[in-house]
Image: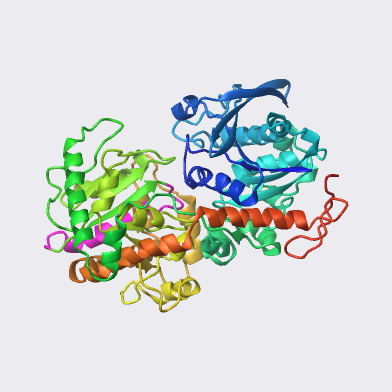
Amino acid sequence: MDRIIAFIAYESPWFPAGGIAAVMGQLPSATEAAAHLPTVVVTPLHLNSAKIAALQMQEVEVLELPYESDLIKIPVLHYHAGCSWYFLKIDYRTGLHGPIFAGIRHPYDVSKEALLRDSLLFGAAAAEALPVIARHRNVKATSVEWNLIAQDWEAATALLAFSSQWMIPGRCHLTLHNSYDEFASTGDLSRVGIDPTRCSGGTILQRALSIIEQPAFTVSDQFALDFTQDLVQREVMAPHLQADLSRSPVFGVDNGPFKALALADADLRGAAIGDFGPLQRWKSGNREKALSALDAHTETENEPVWGNKSKFRRDESPWLVMAGRDDPRQKGYDVAAAAVENYLAEHHDKPDCAQFLFFPIPGDEGLPGLEFLKTLAADFPQDVIVFPFIWAAGFTVTLQGAAYGLMPSLYEPFGMANEFYLAGGCVGIGRATGGNLEQIVPLRATSAFSRAVQVRADRCHGLSAHPTGILFRERDGMASACRDWQAINDAQYDKKGGSPSRVGQRRSFAVFREMATELRIAVEDGIRVYRREPELYYRMLAEGVAHIQRTFSWQRAGQEYARKVAQQVAAKSPDGGMKRTLSGAADARPRPVI
């Protein structure tokens, strides 16, 4: 029997929102190479993506999907980039929620109700498209065993739809990039042809975890532990999944790096033995380029600059940068703003003061939700500047001129420290959680290296490991921790730029205040090292690059997925059923006849 691996993803590199798109740009082709099996990606054709519209696709076939009282026609379109991509186009308007796949800024930029509807339709269409894809690959549809690997709840709907189609043999797998989830009623499922009795539970992820081959995957070893061991995930984000996850703990497969190395190998080798002059000159040159790009930038409504370009100091002060899409429940721009405000209130008039550059990509709250950064830049125009858009002309050289990249993550599945080191040539300062713990080997001789950091860092790094950056963490055992995290996650502040702001409201929680305090301490540690111990700083940078290169690779990630697929196939009994799951528990669920 032929076997095909199919990654099911709601976003793609041509219409990204977060980490899934970046992973899908690398992992499927790496898995195909490792597994020696044909591997495809199935994804929606989002209507408002100019990049998707520009792809030269081939229409494979048009399938029909019953929905409510209608029959929806869905063209299946093929595009090859690393592996075969199949886009599903649903040009159909229903009810009060507007067109299907109509996110403006990113795939999830629609109402909650529309996203649930669109995700369920996508899942049902993806399951129906599998025979079409098989025929396109010149394989008899009835002779294919599918290995579906769905990314997060929006794509896990395909697993629910697949579970209703017992005539198509295959196995369902799930990768969790975060624990966001959505409730789906039996009526919601039945409306798109999914049999609710085949997948028990209340939410999409609960239903998916009841039918997948164990275990579920996630994108780093540490985040796999965090699902059940970290208070934020266990008690606040995913308490409803704990029973399922206790039966089968999540399996972490570390991502590979997302950027190519921008630094010269010879310069890194020199810095590793104390010759940091070439890297220091490289950074200085990039700062000049970044300032020139800043001066040349013409502000528009869509590309404003918050802060005063003329007042922003032009000296040798160290730059600290934070970048990425704003997710109020994960990213930590508010933590950074509070920490920077505390730092600048004490240091802004001192000659050793650092400067801060923020590059937030507006999230669901848009520009108004980032008003607290605009206020910070207005209060400290010499020291803070904010670019609330994708600044193609100046972001990379700014990063390459910076001393540190900040990652004050409320939680972190994998993280962007690898991008800071490889593409930016700057050292990471991160909260000790998730992927930050794996990608940053902490400098222990810092004030930020608290007991809370140590107990976590010791899981990932030996005492003799060369430091590559700075980790911080609020203390453990705070009496109000669970209540504070729940309140932070509830996000009860004015999201349109009024009062209380995100920072203003969250400052009332002890956990938030301690995170901001510990980040300020870490920033002060970093500035001290950069100014007083440049040899140590550049050795951390060189070793940070080497650590990323030694530890993370897409070839390894692809091989881990290939191994798991192979293990599941090897576990089958001769009659095609599963003898036992990977956890050793008997799997009594009826299996498709192969």
- The residue range painted magenta reads 327-351
Residue at 18% across, 36% down: 296
Q: Is residue 472 left or right of residue 289?
A: right
As rendered, which of 108 and 96 lies closer to the eye? 108
Residue 546 % position (x, y): 38, 63
Q: Which residue lies furthest to the right in this view?
A: 575
Q: Is residue 518 magenta?
A: no
Dominant SS of magenta comes to helix
Q: Is residue 450 above or below residue 81?
A: below
Residue at 21% across, 54% down: 282
**Quadrant in the picture for the C terminus:** top right
Q: In this view, does 420 lie above or below 362?
A: below
Residue 446 % position (x, y): 31, 74
Q: Does the magenta stretch include residue 332?
A: yes
Q: In this view, does 221 lie above or below 374?
A: below
**Quadrant in the picture for the N terminus:** top right
Q: Is residue 249 left or right of residue 568?
A: left
As rendered, which of 494 and 75 lies closer to the eye? 75
| Residue 523 in view here | no
Visual colour scheme: rainbow
Residue 419 % position (x, y): 38, 53
| Residue 3 in view here | yes
Residue at 72% across, 58% down: 567
Residue 307 % position (x, y): 20, 44
